[in-house]
Amino acid sequence: MLNIRKAGLLFLAAIILSVGTIRADEGMWMLPLIQKLNSKKMTEMGFKLSAKDIYDINNSSLKDAVLHFGGGCTAEIISKDALVLTNHHCGFGTIQKLSTVDHDYLQNGYWAMNRDQELPAKGLSVIFLDRIEDVTKAVTEAMAAVTDPKAKDEALTKISDQLTAKAIGDNKFLRGRVVSFFGDNQYYMVITKTYNDIRFVGAPPASIGKFGGEADNWMWPRHTGDFSMFRIYADKDNNPAEYSKDNVAYKPKKFLTISLKGVNQNDPAMIIGYPGRTNRFMTSYEVKETSEITNAVTVLVRNVRQNIIWADMDADPKVRLQYASKYANSANSYKKSLGMNETFAKLKVYERRAAEEKIFSEWVAADPARVAKYGKALDDVKSAIEGRAKLLQISRYYMEALSSIELTTAATRFGPQVERAPREGRGGGPGGAGGRPFMMMSPADYYKDYNVTTDIKVAKALIKLFREKVPASDLPEFYKTIDANYQGNVDAYVDAMFAQSVFTSEEKLKAAQAGDKKAMESDLAYVAGRNISTAFMKYNRDLEQYRTQYANGQKLYIAGMLEMKAGQAIYPDANSTMRLTYGRVLNYSPKDGVIYDFVTTLDGVMQKEDPKNYEFEVPSKLKELYNAKDYGQYAMKDGRMPVDFLTNNDITGGNSGSPVLNGKGELIGTAFDGNWESMSSDIIFEPLLQRTISLDIRYTLFIMDKFGGAGYLLNEMKISK
Ligand code: ARG
């Protein structure tokens, strides 16, 4: 698919790389398959590790030092006493929860000066990978016996339970699940071990950990010190245990050696982590849907909501802390959607996918056996996507707009507790935007981060916006109340709802729970919340038939692509299982006439400093260290202090916090972002533009040691100079 434009870029790349034939490295590879698919290439590129050094189920290997952190991130063990390194934005929610306006660890940073000062992070857990096994044969055989499509899910659950029960045996610390790969064409069983007593050890202030804020997010050149540190605790037998004062630091099977040798252009670099979701087999129809429906709705609604929240955060430090995590999560996806749409257009992603589909269709048409097998694949995808357009659009508005109103969501969540004894599994539509799974939150946790006056403004704006965007026949019931009782005046309705509802504060909620079981039917927020979730579930049900049709088409399409490309090394889409990506340290050219260096330094932090802009403040202690050039053993050879660097590894959300390792498997950095020029990367890997942005480990240790005064932690690490 090398077209003229790309050929031009390739020529440019040859100049930048000046290393001739070496190409950039696409692929999120499964660890058990490295020997077969990647080892040869990796050795050629300068990696000194064997496949068994990376993944071995009988001996300790690198995979034992890599963790699935808090559900959505990656982290790594960097000391003999299970010190854990991840991104600041991965620890963000936990750090926020541990903070108060008087002890604001987000704002000021924190360092435990001994084990007693390590702060228990309730609700946080890390997951180790024990092993991953191909169970495609067992699963497909079990599924083949089932003809009724409705019984398929059940059959899958049954065979998964059987397989995992057998694998785990009587080991009560292990858990297992079966995961689909290549659009249900392959299945693997993942066996894991979870530790729950995790403690917060330290992090820089946001002015370092989140330096550049939303302005710099998803962009290079970058100067963010995006890291935080935790520690895993275990019982005296080194096994997982709930928090206890008697627990001790976990003794890891494997921890990473840290390299202070730094990075140079073209150095080999690999990343092991937990990429969440990619869609590398996405068709042109879905590209259009993602751009015109999913991303468009996200951008439109979040812009309105975020502006309201940001104004309140800016005006009040309490609100700033309360909404810090919700805002960051929302803003991160907002900017991702915006960038993705821009890049779709720039890189002609739709056209390129349409061209690939044409090649596929021609390949299918060339052979009657293929026609019989794959002939319907693309048609199924196309008609599912086109058939669901209107429904999907409405359901996205429900999700993004109405479900972002905190009061009605809280009413749906806590209402049943007031109305009658709590029930399990009461459906509640999609949870609040971002942050921890809302459905698991206690009222205390929930109301700690709730500001009623902000929510009133959000509710007014989003209820109006929803009415503008969604056909009258698809509005939830409560709009009739607005028209009948409030002459269509949304503001009056929202004011009445907030004045009257018991869900505006923890005190009122408690009082309602303690008093007579109130008739919830008179609580406007409860009623609206129910209307929203009922409607949302209806749209979800209506979408089901398209989901099935799409899944069938996609499964065939991917199966066909695998057959068409047989003999080539192909990796499955990311699905929150552990993957490896290998590549090199590499600069890039964002546009004609411009080359971006692969490294940034503290000089750039000073150049960006803006005391009047919250996102670009520089702490005075950092300025002192900068002025004195007091960098200790962490400086580069030329005396500058490195901050972030670029590699061409293939990562996505979920990889945040992943270890970046050199050719010997030593830790050189922590991955934390992607770059603006390749925001369509979940769909197409763009060799010349796609880069991973990582934090140099030398900056991490410099901040911990020289800035944070926690140099004592170096004693438990293994440093290679
Ligand atoms: N863009 C990063 C990612 O998705 C997250 C960065 C978080 N920082 C922020 N300013 N919101 O992996």
Image: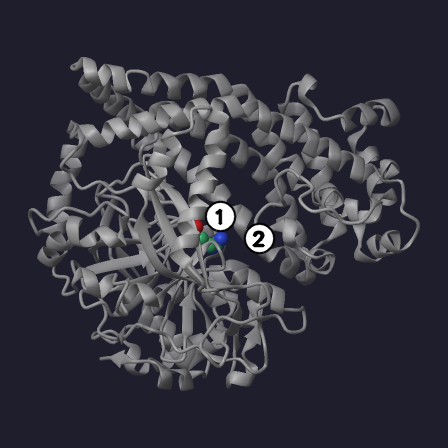
Which quadrant: the N terminus? top left
In depth, the one of 670 and 163 nearer the eye is 163
Residue beneath the point at 41% across and 39% down: 339
Amino acid at circle 2: Gly
Residue 393 pos. (x, y %): 55, 25
Residue 652 pos. (x, y %): 37, 48
Provide the residue designation for mark 2. 435
Can you tell which quarter of the image residue 42 is in?
Answer: bottom left
- In the current view of this chain or complex, which residue is farthest to the right? 516
**Quick one: label 2, few (<14), some, or many (20+) residues within 10 Å?**
some
Q: CA distance from mark 1 to mark 2?
A: 12 Å
Residue beneath the point at 26% across and 69% down: 59
User: On the rendered structure, is 416 left or right of 11?
Assistant: right
User: Tag 2 or tag 1, which sits nearer the N-term?
Assistant: 1
User: On the rendered structure, is 370 left or right of 307?
Assistant: left
Amino acid at circle 1: Asn
Q: Is residue 184 visible?
A: no
* Pointers 1 and 2 in contact (C-beta within 8 Å): no
For residue 332, the mark is: 1
Can you tell which quarter of the image residue 644 is in?
Answer: bottom left
In depth, the one of 415 and 712 nearer the eye is 415
